Amino acid sequence: MSRVLITGGAGVLGAAVARRLLADPNYDVRVSDERSAPQWMREACEIRGADLRAPAQAQAALKGCSQVIHLASFRADDGAGAALAHTQIEYENALHNAVIRAALDCGVERFVYVSSPLVFERAEVFPTPEDYLPQCPVALSPGGFARLSGERYCRAAHDEHDFPFTICRPFATYGPAPASASASASTSTSTSASTSTSASEPGVSGAVAEVIDGALAGRHPLRVDAAGEQTLSPTHVDDIAGGIVAALGSPAALYEDFNLASSRALSVAEIAQLVWQACGEQAGELALEQIGAGDRKPTRSQPATDKARELLGWQAQIAFEDGVAATVRSLREQAMADRHIGSAL
């Protein structure tokens, strides 16, 4: 049996990866996260609370693990990320340094680094293949630069120490957040639960989450960035988790990087329309309100996905319409459970 450490495993993507690993009797799962883990995770996994920037704590978290899925990243309150540029880069560099050093010292057999589509934020080639990265203009955002730095850490460790890495870049991941970690975690009386935002995990789409949250809350018009012209490849969290686990176990994935995404590109306006429909609203009544700088050029994100299909046998299976419908149902069920917990306290 292989013991796998998931760093930052208590979030949206970490929970989906943990569930996928737990379904395979060949894996024993340890989760290291400063956040509280949901009850099912505490019962099924070994939980370690740690600040993985500290070398001693990173060493303790990795000890005894043969494989690592590195999801941990800097997290900021909504809207605070841009104001904490130096803090984010400083935090993630310390994180990469401590965790990768611990992985080297512990002799892990496979290290899967979960990066971000932000490394391609200035791409000029679409669909964007993995081997375009050396020619892509360097990411300017703190998140993009920090994620790219993590990729460079992996490659440098391989060049010097034959570090057994694989890089996965999840694109526009969406899905319901894990259930509350404890009965007292939520006393909300809101009619909706909250999805995750891009500040919480690499690759989790803040744009998709905000549209779903807004539609569930009945906000009208829905507020979207760049007038809804930004394009994304929204991919359900269960599909992304399947790609990460496939990369973890595949000999063909060693020393490779993979874009994990749906092959279907949608504008944020199209995403909003489909979410509006999934929430039971009348499609013709949807109105969008632009937020952000009006003269900012819309960005485009459309990854090539051939490599994951050819080397891993992986491709996204869940259509966006089906995934959003399931996400809306799950979030409504969570909201009802949270209201019940709140009324009982």
Image (cartoon, grey):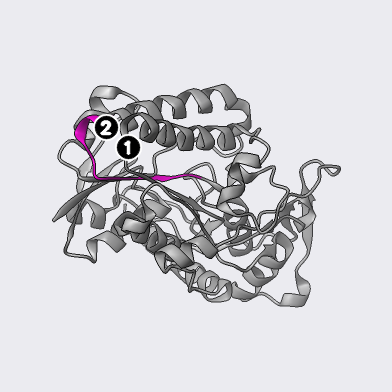
Q: Quadrant of residue 134?
A: top right
In percent of width and height, residue 90 lies at 49, 22
In percent of width and height, residue 95 lies at 39, 29
Residue at the image point whose x is 29% and y is 61% from the top: 19
Q: Quadrant of residue 141?
A: top right
Distance between the Cα atoms at labels 2 and 1?
A: 7 Å
Instruction: Indicate the secondary structure of the residue bearing disc 2.
Output: helix
Which badge, 2 or 1, is on the more N-terminal residue? 2
**Bounds of the magenta segment:** 102-115
Amino acid type at image mark 1: Phe
Q: Quadrant of residue 92?
A: top left
Question: Does 311 sit above or below residue 34?
Answer: below
Is 278 placed left or right of 336 in the picture? Answer: right
Instruction: Indicate the secondary structure of the residue bearing disc 1.
Output: loop
Residue at the image point whose x is 41% and y is 61% from the top: 243
Question: Does 95 sit above or below residue 293?
Answer: above
Magenta region includes residue 111: yes
- Seen from the viewer's position, the closer of residues 277 and 130 is 130
Q: Is residue 87 visible?
A: yes
In percent of width and height, residue 130 lies at 56, 51
Q: Is residue 16 visible?
A: no
Mark in the foreground, 2 or 1:
1
Q: Residues within 10 Å of mark 1 (few under 14, many from 20)?
A: many
Which residue is denoted by mark 1 in the rendering?
A: 163
Considering the image in quadrants, where does the N terminus appear?
bottom left
Residue at the image point whose x is 63% and y is 36% from the top: 139
Q: Are marks 2 and 1 in contact (CB under 8 Å)?
A: yes
Magenta region includes residue 168: no
Q: Residues within 10 Å of mark 2 (few under 14, many from 20)?
A: some
Which residue is denoted by mark 2 in the rendering?
A: 104
